[in-house]
C-alpha cells in the first residue's frame, strides 16, 4: 500500500523513468484481470462514481483517504469547537509530500496537475474534515502557482520548498473591506522608496485565511494610481512578503485581527492592517503593475480546488444521511423507505454527480492549457495551439458555481434527514452545513459568476 505522495511519485534514482511513468507503473494493477484493489480502502462509505478518472487521480484519492482516516470526525469536531488550527493534520500532509502535488519537481514538488490537486482537496473534505481540513492547506496549493510560474529563481528556491515541506505556510492577500469583488479598485498601496530598494505598504485586507499561522503572504497591492493607468487591469502588483510572528509585530507596521466566524472555525480568518509596512523590492513577483494578470493564473486554479472541496463536503453529507436513513427506524421501518426522505437525497446525489463532471472538466482544461503554454515556451510546435484562457475561466467559474450549489443542497438535506439529531454536533452534518456556505460566497459570489457567464458567454450587456 502506498501511503504518501513521495512513495507514489518519486522515481528510483537509478531509473530514467519520468514522474508520470513512475505513477502509472504503480497503478497498473487496476487494469489487471484480478478483482482485488491495489490499495486498501478506509472503512468510510464512498458513494461517488469514479468511472472515468485517471490512474493518477485514483491513486491520489486512495492514498489521501488512507491518511485522512487517521484524523476522525471527533478530531474535527474538537478543533472546530476550540477554534484550534489543525497543525498536526497539515504536518502529516506535508510529511507525505502532498503540499507539493501541483508544484514543479525541480522545487521539490511532484509535478502533477490541478486535476490531481482537486481530487486531493475533494478527498480531504469528503473524509469528514470538511472545509476546515481543506482550507488548512488550500492557499499552499493554489497561491503558490503564480510564484512557481512568474517568480524569480531565487524567490522560488527560497519559498516553495519550505512550503512543500510544511516549514512555512502561506496565505493570499487580495480581498479588501471597501472594494470586495471589485478587485481592480483595490486601495492597498505599495509605494517604492526613492532608492528603489523597498516598498512601503499601507492599507487593509480582510478574510485572509490562515494569516495567523502563515510565514508568507502573496499580496496584491496598487503600485500605480488607478487614474494614471491606461487600463483598469494595470497598476496592481503581486508581492511575496514575510509575515512577522505575533511577538515581533509591534512597531512593524503590520497588525492582524482574528474574525469570529460561523463555520470552519479550525482555521483562522483575519483582517490584516498595513501602516507603512516595509517590504524589500525583491519581493515583487513578475513585472510591476501586471499583478492582476499574474493572479488570474491562480484564480482559475482556486476555483477548481474549491469546487472539489464543495463536492467532498456534499458527498460526505449525502453518504452520512443515507446511512442514517437506512438505520433509523420509525413506524416500524427505516425512514429511508419513505420517498419523502429517499427522493431528496437521490436528487442531491445527482446534482453532485453533474457538478463533478463540470469540476474535473475545468481542471482538465486548466492542466491542458498549462501544458500547452510550457510546450510553446520550450520551443515546441506552435501550431498545436493553446486552450483559450477565457474557456478555462468559463469552465472554472461554472464548476465552482455548480459544485457550491450542489454541496449546499446536499448538506441542508442531510441535516433535515437527521431531524432533531441533525442539530447535534456529534452527527457532523450541522458542521458541514455551516461550512458549505463558504464555496457559495467565496472567492467570488454566485451572482458575480452569473454576471460573468451572461457577459462572456451569452453576450449580454454588463450589469455592473
Image (cartoon, helix red, strand yellow):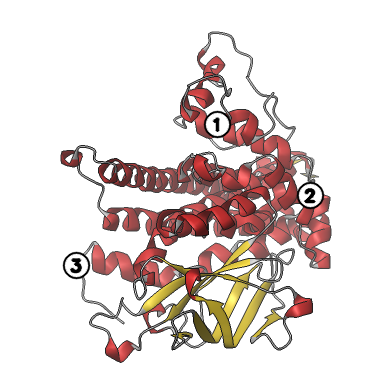
- Disc number for residue 459: 3
Q: How dense is the environment of label 2, judged by Cα within 10 Å: few (below 14), some, or many (20 and up)?
A: some
Asked whether residue 37 is in view, the answer is yes
Q: Residue at x 55, y 21 (%)?
A: 27
**78 left or right, relative to 130:** right
Tell me whether the residue at label 1 lies in contact with that at label 3, contact meaning CB atoms closer than 8 angstroms.
no
Q: How dense is the environment of label 3, judged by Cα within 10 Å: few (below 14), some, or many (20 and up)?
A: few
- Looking at the image, the residue that sits furthest to the top is 33
- Disc number for residue 75: none
**First in sequence: mark 1 vs mark 2:** 1
Distance (Cα) linking label 1 and label 2: 23 Å
Q: Percent position (x, y) of residue 333?
A: 76, 39
Q: To which residue does mark 2 refer?
A: 73
Looking at the rendered image, the quarter that the N terminus falls into is top right
- Please name whichever residue, 328 or 8, is drawn nearer the observer in this view of the structure: 8
- Looking at the image, the residue that sits furthest to the left is 383
Q: Percent position (x, y) of residue 348?
A: 54, 49
Q: To which residue does mark 1 refer?
A: 58
Q: Is residue 161 above or below residue 48?
A: below
Q: Residue at x 60, y 50 (%)?
A: 161
Q: Percent position (x, y) of residue 238?
A: 44, 71
Amino acid at each position: 500500500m502506498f501511503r504518501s505522495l513521495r512513495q507514489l511519485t518519486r522515481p528510483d534514482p537509478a531509473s530514467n523513468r519520468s514522474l508520470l511513468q513512475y505513477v502509472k507503473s504503480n497503478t497498473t494493477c487496476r487494469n489487471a484481470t484480478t478483482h482485488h484493489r491495489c490499495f486498501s480502502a478506509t472503512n468510510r462509505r464512498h458513494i461517488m462514481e469514479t468511472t472515468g478518472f485517471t490512474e493518477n487521480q485514483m491513486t491520489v484519492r486512495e492514498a489521501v483517504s488512507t491518511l485522512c482516516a487517521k484524523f476522525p470526525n471527533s478530531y474535527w469536531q474538537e478543533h472546530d469547537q476550540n477554534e484550534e488550527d489543525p497543525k498536526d493534520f497539515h504536518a502529516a500532509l506535508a510529511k507525505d509530500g502532498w503540499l507539493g502535488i501541483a508544484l514543479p519537481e525541480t522545487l521539490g514538488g511532484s509535478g502533477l496537475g490541478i486535476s490531481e490537486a482537486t481530487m486531493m482537496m475533494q478527498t480531504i473534505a469528503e473524509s469528514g474534515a470538511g472545509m476546515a481540513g481543506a482550507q488548512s492547506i488550500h492557499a499552499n496549493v493554489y497561491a503558490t502557482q503564480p510564484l512557481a510560474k512568474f517568480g524569480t529563481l531565487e524567490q522560488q528556491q527560497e519559498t516553495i520548498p519550505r512550503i512543500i515541506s510544511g516549514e512555512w505556510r502561506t496565505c493570499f492577500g487580495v480581498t479588501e473591506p471597501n472594494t470586495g469583488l471589485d478587485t481592480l479598485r483595490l486601495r492597498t498601496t505599495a509605494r517604492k522608496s526613492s532608492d528603489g530598494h523597498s516598498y512601503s505598504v499601507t492599507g487593509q485586507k480582510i478574510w485572509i485565511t490562515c494569516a495567523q499561522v502563515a510565514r508568507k503572504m502573496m499580496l496584491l497591492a496598487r503600485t500605480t494610481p488607478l487614474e494614471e493607468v491606461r487600463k483598469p487591469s494595470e497598476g496592481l502588483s503581486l508581492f511575496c512578503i514575510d509575515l512577522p510572528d505575533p511577538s515581533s509585530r509591534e512597531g512593524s507596521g503590520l497588525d492582524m485581527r482574528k474574525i469570529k466566524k460561523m463555520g470552519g472555525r479550525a482555521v483562522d480568518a483575519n483582517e490584516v492592517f498595513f501602516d507603512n509596512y516595509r517590504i524589500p523590492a525583491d519581493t515583487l513577483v513578475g513585472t510591476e503593475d501586471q499583478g492582476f494578470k499574474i493572479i488570474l493564473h491562480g484564480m482559475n486554479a482556486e476555483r477548481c480546488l474549491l469546487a472539489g472541496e464543495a463536492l467532498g463536503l456534499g458527498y460526505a453529507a449525502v453518504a452520512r444521511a443515507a446511512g442514517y436513513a437506512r438505520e433509523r427506524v420509525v413506524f416500524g421501518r427505516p425512514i429511508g423507505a419513505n420517498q419523502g426522505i429517499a427522493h431528496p437525497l437521490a436528487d442531491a446525489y445527482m446534482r453532485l454527480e453533474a457538478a463533478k463532471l463540470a469540476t474535473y472538466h475545468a481542471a482538465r482544461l486548466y492542466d491542458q492549457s498549462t501544458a500547452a503554454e510550457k510546450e510553446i515556451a520550450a520551443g515546441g510546435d506552435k501550431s498545436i495551439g493553446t486552450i483559450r484562457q477565457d474557456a478555462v475561466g468559463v469552465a472554472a467559474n461554472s464548476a465552482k458555481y455548480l459544485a457550491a450549489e450542489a454541496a449546499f443542497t446536499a448538506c441542508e438535506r442531510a441535516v433535515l434527514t437527521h431531524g432533531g439529531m441533525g442539530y447535534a454536533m456529534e452527527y457532523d452534518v450541522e458542521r458541514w452545513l455551516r461550512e458549505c456556505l463558504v464555496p457559495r460566497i467565496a472567492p467570488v459570489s454566485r451572482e458575480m459568476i452569473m454576471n460573468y457567464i451572461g457577459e462572456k458567454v451569452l453576450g449580454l450587456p454588463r450589469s455592473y
